[in-house]
Image (spheres, coloured by chain):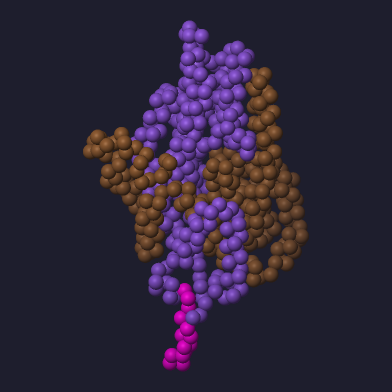
């Protein structure tokens, strides 16, 4: 089948429809094929636009119900590329099913490698930290700043990600591997790690009033506590060590919730033994 | 709590539950969820403060790959109800939020397993090009996730005003509640560790230590200031990094792609 058919490209309405659907892509996340149904549902406007025979539509739905898992927001760029490929396939049939699946699968990993540090590692924690610091004094600005800040970033990523992917088509593969996105990822990682480091110091409170030495001086009792020693050495040292311990445990696939319960146990036992204080 | 508030609380919980799987509009984050519960219960102020405190703890909680984070949605809605309607302290609310996050995680894993059934139903609908059917499978999974938070939240909301809850909470010995408050001071590092591990950027760890040292010894600097310093460090790092100077290393650029020391993209 090599004759070229006239296929109408996605209309503005289709793109808006696809965008709206993509914001629900994780709704039916399951442990077998993860985000698969969400991908198929997002692709439905494109499938309807490009294919009119029932068997073509069924085949398209089937190939978008395959395993899919990546960082959700930038995934819109993959949907754009996929839509562009589907359009080409509908036009001349030269692109085979495997090519579409391969590009989708091939972009999943690299995109998560970019998306996770930028969105989950930098944008969200920093906005959340900023929002929370305002919220602690009861200011409504805190939640508002976080909610609107993160959602603007998300909407721009989805909307322009899809448009970019759709206009670039398979050329996007070079962009993903290229330097520009790598630069962005590195910048996000530097900023994210920098802020994490400062949070470890600023937003932990560990008090250790455990008395190490106690002596009489001019009729007064002078206590030297564990906290005083640690503060002279490096304030925040205990929090730093605890962070490393958590990183080590997480790397060994210990579930975060067990670590949290372990920390509760340490807190309760430490308070009971008098090592930690309020 | 009147009937109207009860319905609104359940609606908020439903939205938060759906948001927790979608990870899209961030209604499931404590900062938003607790604020909304506070709003419908008429105590916005407490909701915001509790949300801020919980957000600090949950800062790094994220779903990456197939790994499930502790669930902030259920933790936020129920603890906000118990603090506001049950007249408990914020500290108490945080202490109960953590077991709730664990329970929520178990529930979402359960739902995500059940949703495999919808996945197979979707396959049948797809074979007949039944778009509506596939869409309903999707919505079905989403609704289950909403109910997973709405039902337990509704149950707690129904008893939160009675003396039952305060009796249970009063029965906890003070050494436990104080111990939980103590651990609240350092439990946040679990989230930080999750973020640092996810970055997979060992070579960039000096920036972590710079941030730590500056925050420790520069008293008076706030998050905005630290953020500006971090952003400057990020820009300078990329500007000076020879990996990104295509012009200089054009002859070797082709062979060097993917073989450098950072494993962010690996």
Is residue A226 covered in magenta? yes
Residue A36 seen in this snapshot: yes
x 51%, y 19%: residue:
A96
Q: Is B173 left or right of B229, judged from the image as shown?
A: right
Figure chain in brown? B
Q: Is residue A198 above or below residue A186?
A: below
Q: Nearer the viewer, residue A15 or B236?
A: B236
The percent coordinates of residue B79 (x first, y second) are 65, 54
x 62%, y 43%: residue:
B16
Is residue A11 covered in magenta? no
The percent coordinates of residue B96 (x first, y second) are 65, 58
Q: Is residue A259 above or below residue A143?
A: below
Q: Nearer the viewer, residue A174 or B75?
A: A174
Within the image, what quadrant is residue A271 found in? bottom right
Tell me the quadrant of the picture where the C terminus of chain B can be found: top left
x 61%, y 60%: residue:
A261
Q: Nearer the viewer, residue B165 or B199?
A: B199
- Residue bounds of the magenta highlight: A213-227
x 39%, y 63%: residue:
B216
Residue B27 seen in this snapshot: no
Figure chain in purple? A
């Amino acid at each position: 089948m090599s004759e070229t058919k006239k296929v109408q490209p996605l209309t503005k309405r289709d793109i808006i429809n696809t965008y709206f659907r993509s914001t629900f892509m994780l709704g039916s996340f399951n442990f077998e094929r993860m985000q698969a149904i969400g991908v198929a549902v997002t692709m439905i406007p494109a499938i309807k636009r490009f294919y009119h025979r029932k068997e073509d539509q069924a085949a398209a739905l089937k190939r978008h119900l395959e395993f899919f898992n990546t960082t959700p927001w930038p995934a819109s760029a993959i949907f754009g590329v996929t839509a562009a490929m589907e359009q080409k396939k509908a036009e001349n049939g030269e692109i085979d099913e495997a090519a579409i699946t391969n590009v989708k699968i091939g972009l999943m990993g690299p995109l998560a490698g970019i998306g996770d540090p930028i969105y989950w590692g930098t944008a969200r924690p920093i906005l959340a930290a900023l929002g929370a610091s305002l919220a602690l004094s009861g200011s409504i600005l805190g939640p508002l700043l976080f909610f609107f800040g993160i959602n603007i970033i998300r909407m721009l990523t989805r909307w322009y990600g899809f448009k970019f992917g759709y206009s670039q088509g398979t050329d996007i593969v070079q962009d993903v591997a290229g330097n520009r996105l790598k630069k962005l990822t590195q910048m996000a990682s530097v900023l994210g790690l920098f802020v994490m480091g400062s949070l470890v110091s600023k937003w932990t409170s560990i008090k250790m009033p455990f008395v190490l030495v106690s002596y009489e001086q001019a009729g007064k009792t002078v206590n030297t506590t564990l906290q005083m020693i640690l503060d002279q050495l490096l304030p925040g040292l205990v929090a730093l060590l605890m962070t490393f311990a958590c990183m080590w445990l997480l790397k060994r696939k210990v579930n975060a919730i067990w670590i949290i319960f372990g920390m509760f146990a340490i807190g309760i036992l430490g308070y009971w033994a008098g090592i930690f204080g309020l | 709590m009147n009937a109207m508030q009860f319905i609104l609380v359940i609606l908020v919980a439903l939205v938060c539950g759906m948001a927790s799987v979608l990870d899209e509009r961030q209604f499931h984050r404590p900062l938003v969820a607790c604020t909304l519960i506070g709003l419908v219960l008429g105590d916005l102020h407490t909701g915001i403060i509790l949300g801020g405190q919980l957000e600090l703890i949950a800062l790094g909680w994220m779903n990456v790959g197939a790994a499930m984070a502790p669930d902030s949605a259920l933790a936020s809605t129920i603890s906000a109800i118990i603090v506001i309607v049950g007249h408990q302290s914020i500290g108490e609310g945080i202490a109960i939020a953590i077991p709730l996050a664990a329970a929520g995680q178990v529930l979402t894993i359960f739902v995500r397993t059940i949703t495999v059934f919808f996945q197979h139903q979707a396959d049948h609908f797809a074979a007949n090009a039944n778009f509506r059917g596939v869409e309903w499978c999707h919505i079905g999974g989403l609704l289950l996730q909403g109910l997973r938070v709405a039902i337990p939240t509704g149950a707690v909301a129904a008893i939160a005003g009675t003396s039952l809850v305060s009796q249970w909470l009063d029965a906890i010995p003070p050494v436990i509640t104080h111990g939980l408050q103590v651990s609240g001071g350092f439990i946040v590092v679990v989230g930080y560790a999750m973020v640092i591990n996810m970055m997979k950027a060992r070579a960039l760890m000096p920036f972590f230590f710079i941030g730590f040292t500056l925050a420790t010894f520069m008293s008076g600097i706030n998050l905005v200031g630290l953020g500006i310093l971090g952003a400057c460090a990020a820009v300078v790092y990329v500007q000076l990094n020879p990996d990104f100077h295509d012009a200089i290393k054009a002859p070797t650029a082709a062979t060097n792609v993917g073989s450098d020391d950072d494993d962010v993209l690996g």
